[in-house]
Amino acid sequence: MFGTWAGGWHQNLEVWGPSGRTPEYGLNTMVEGMKMMTNWHRDAFSVFLVGKGWDVIAHEFDFKDNGGVIYDRNGVKIIHWERSHAKDGASAYRLDWNGLCFVWTGDCWPSELDEKYAKGCDVYVNELQQEVVEINSGVQGVPPFLARYTIDTHHTPGYASGYLANRVQPRLFMTTHMSYDPFIAEETVAEVREHWKGPYHFGAPDGIVVNVIKDQIWVRDGVLPENLKQSMGDRWRQKVCNEEILEEQEPEQKEEE
C-alpha cells in the first residue's frame, strides 16, 4: 500500500507467475485475492496520491509451457519450466542478461528438466533438505515418517541436489531452503559432494551477495543497514553469536577451525 508513497504512483505494479492446473490456483486469482485483502486500506488511503500505483498488471503464464519466455525487456530474458511441490503449479526460472545466466528453481522436487534448461548456467540455485530425518523429528516435534514424507513429496534431498548440479555443470552451485544449523553443515556438504565436486556455497536466507562477471564469481556478506538487521531478528543474532563464539576460542582452536 505504501508503494505509491515511495514514488510508485506513476507506474503500474507488474507481477509474473504461473497458472495452476485450475484457475483458482493461478496468479490471476491470487492477485484478485490480494486486492480483496487490502480493500479497506485502498479505500482509506485513496485520499493520497495514488495514480497507477495500485493498478496491478498480472502476467499469468501456462505452467506447463516448459521453456516458454515470460519476460524479455532491455536485454533481460527469463524463461520458466514446471516443478512439483506436492502438486502442479510450481515453476523454475532462468534469467539471461549480457552473456550471463542465473537459475532459481524454488522450493520443489528434483527435476530432470533442470538439465535441459539450466545447463551450463553461471549460478544455479536449487533447494536442499538434508537427510537427517531423526534430527528433524526431534527438533520439530513431528513423527519421523512425516519428516520423511515431506522430503519425498515436496523437497530435494541433498544427494539429489548435488546430482542435479553435476548434470547442470554451473560455474557456481548454491543451495537454499535448508537448515543452516552449524551442527549439520558438514552433513549437508557431504551429501552434496557425493555427486558435485565443483564450487559450492550455502545460499543464506538474507544478506548474501553473489558477484558474477565473465571470468570470476565470488560470494560475500552484504552491507546491511541496522534496521534490516533488526528485521532479520534471530537469524542475524545467531550469525553474530557464532562469530563471537569463534572470537572467544583459543588461538590454536581457531587455527584448527
Image (cartoon, helix red, strand yellow):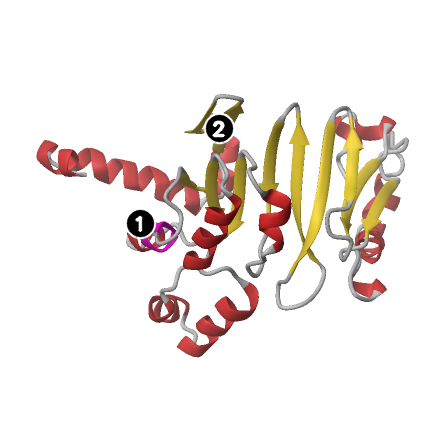
Amino acid on which the number 1 mark rests in the picture: Pro
Judged by its main secondary structure, the magenta piece is: helix
Query: Circle 2 sits in a helix, a strand or a loop, which is it?
Result: loop
Amino acid on which the number 2 mark rests in the picture: Leu
Residue 202 placed where, x, y %?
A: 42, 43
Residue 27 - label: none
Residue 182 - label: 1
Q: Residue at x 73, y 52 (%)?
A: 66
| Residue 130 vs residue 137, the one in the foreground | 130
Q: Which residues are magenta?
A: 189-193
> 257 left or right of 137?
left
Q: Are marks 1 and 2 in contact (CB under 8 Å)?
A: no
The residue at which mark 2 appears reads as 224
Residue 232 placed where, x, y %?
A: 49, 41
Above or below, comparing residue 247 to residue 27 in the picture: above
User: Could you tell which of marks 1 and 2 lies nearer the N-terminus?
Assistant: 1
